[in-house]
Amino acid sequence: MSAAARLEDLHKNYVLKSETVRALRGVSFEVPEGDYVAIMGPSGSGKSTLLNLLGCLDRPSEGRLFLGDDDISQMNDNQLSYTRASRIGFVFQSYNLIQQLTVVENIEVPLYYQGTLSKEDRARCAEWADLVGLGDRLGHRPAQLSGGQQQRVAIARSLVNDPYFILADEPTGNLDTATTTEILRLFENLNDMGKTIIMVTHEDEVSVHAKRVIRLRDGLVQSDVLNGDDRVKLNTSGGPIDLFAKAEKSTAP
Ligand code: ADP
C-alpha cells in the first residue's frame, strides 16, 4: 500500500532580489494511510511552506514529494491544480465557506471540479452533513451557523472527494475550548474510520490528540515522535460517535 504522502529530501528556496531564503532544507518523512500527524514549530520554521507543498499549491525546489503514487514534484501547473482540487481535503482556520451557498451546497463544491453532480453525489453530500452532525441544517447558510458548525461543514466538504488526506491549517484557531474539543473529537472519529489527517497547529493542547507530532525548526525536521500512550483520546462518549458507528456500516468510502 502506498503512503498517503512521502517526502524525500524536500527543499524549497524562495529567490528574492538580494538573497535566497531556504525555507525547507531537506525534509524527509512518510505519512502512512490512516495516520494523524500534527506539524508544529516556531514562526519561520517552514510550516506554511510545507503546507503549500502538501496542498499542491507549490512545487519543491529539490527533492521529491509523492501523494499516493503521484509524484507532485514532476507535475505541471494544470496537473497540480487538478490534484489540489480533486484529491486534497483542505480545512482552514477561517472555514472558507461560500456565504451564498447552503450547508449541503458548500459540501458539494469540490465535486463540481469533476463535472456535474449526480443524484447519488447529492445524496452522499447530505449524508456527510449528517455524519458531522448537521443533518438538520442542510438548508442553512454559513451566517446562520456557529463557528463550530461552520468548521463541521468545512470538514464534511474536505471529505467528499476521497482525498489522500485532510490537510488542516490551525483548524481550531478560531474556536473556544469546548468547540475545539468537539472538532478534535470529530477528527478523532474520522481517523478511527481510517481517514488520514495532517494538521498544522501551534497548540500543544491540540497536538496531544494526534498520533504523531513532527516539529520543524529552521526548515528541517527537528523531531518526529509518536504520541503513543500519552495520546489524549477524546473518543470516549456522546457526540457524533453513534453517527460514526452508523457511517462505518453505510457510507464509509
Ligand atoms: P512558518 O509557517 O513556520 O512561520 P514559513 O514557511 O512561512 O514558516 O516561512 C519559512 C521561511 O521562508 C521564513 O524565513 C519566511 O520568511 C520565508 N518565506 C516564506 N514564504 C516566502 C515567500 N513567498 N517569499 C520569500 N520568503 C518566504
Image (cartoon, helix red, strand yellow):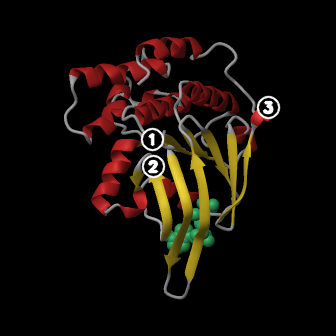
- Label 2, secondary structure: give it: strand
Q: Are marks 1 and 2 in contact (CB under 8 Å)?
A: yes
Residue 38: image quadrant is top right
Q: Is residue 137 left or right of residue 122?
A: right
| Vertical position of residue 30 compared to residue 174: above or below | below
Q: Is disc 1 placed on a helix, strand or loop?
A: loop
Which residue is painted at 34% across and 46% down in the image? 85
SS of the residue at dot 3?
helix
Residue sitting at x 68%, y 42%: 212
Q: Is residue 91 left or right of residue 172?
A: left
The amino acid sitting under disc 3 is Asp
Residue bearing the label numbered 1: 164
Question: Is residue 194 depicted above or below 58 in this figure?
Answer: above
Q: Give the residue type that dot 1 points to.
A: Tyr
**Which residue: 49% across, 53% down?**
54
Residue at which label 3 appears: 229
Check disc 2 and give the amino acid type: Leu
Q: Which residue is mark 2?
A: 67
Up the image or down, 79 lies above or below 219; here it is above
Question: Does the Cβ of the disc 3 residue fall within 8 Å of ligand 1?
Answer: no
